[in-house]
Amino acid sequence: MVSVNEFAISTANDIPGFKIVETKGFIYGLTVRSRGAGGQIGAGIKSLFGGEITQYVKMMEESREEALYRAIQHAKELGANGIVAIRFDSNEISEVMQEILVYGTAVVVQKE
């Protein structure tokens, strides 16, 4: 379980120490990102020599955080204070664009 700003999140179907008292429904957060031309040129040069391409790592970390934030906002709009069965998915839209999707089930939980 991870707590993001007092919001209970779990990849499992429950949250240890909490009781699910209400299910609010399916939620998601989505973002699509692309590196600018300069970043792509730099990453292309780095790929010639091998190793981690830090420009893309940073972009994916920021994308993941943004998608998670949007999923939490969606859950809060439904009146939830937690998300269970949360998942991350990533798809290439084109050679220069990446989609990050976070989805799960919004729930209301109480501490046991």
Image: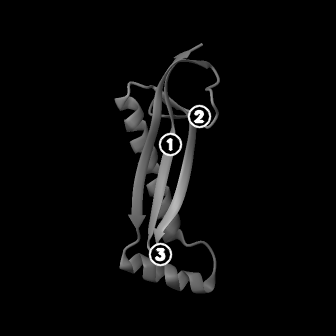
Which label sits in the foreground, 1 or 2?
1
Quarter of the C terminus within the rendering? top right
Q: Is residue 42 left or right of residue 17?
A: left
Quarter of the N terminus within the rendering? top right
Mark 2 or mark 3: whose residue is earlier in sequence:
2
Of the pair 74 and 110, the residue shown nearer to us: 74
Mark 3 or mark 1: whose residue is earlier in sequence:
3
Q: From this viewpoint, which residue is outermost toward the left? A: 77
The answer to whether residue 10 is above or below residue 35 is: above
Q: Position of residue 22 (x, y in %)?
A: 49, 18
What kind of residue is marked 2? Ser
Q: Secondary structure at mark 1?
A: strand
Q: Residue at x 51, y 83 (%)?
A: 44
Residue underneath mark 3:
95
What is the number of the mark on residue 103?
1
**CB under 8 Å between discs 3 and 1:** no
Which label sits in the foreground, 2 or 3?
3
Q: Is residue 69 left or right of residue 61?
A: left
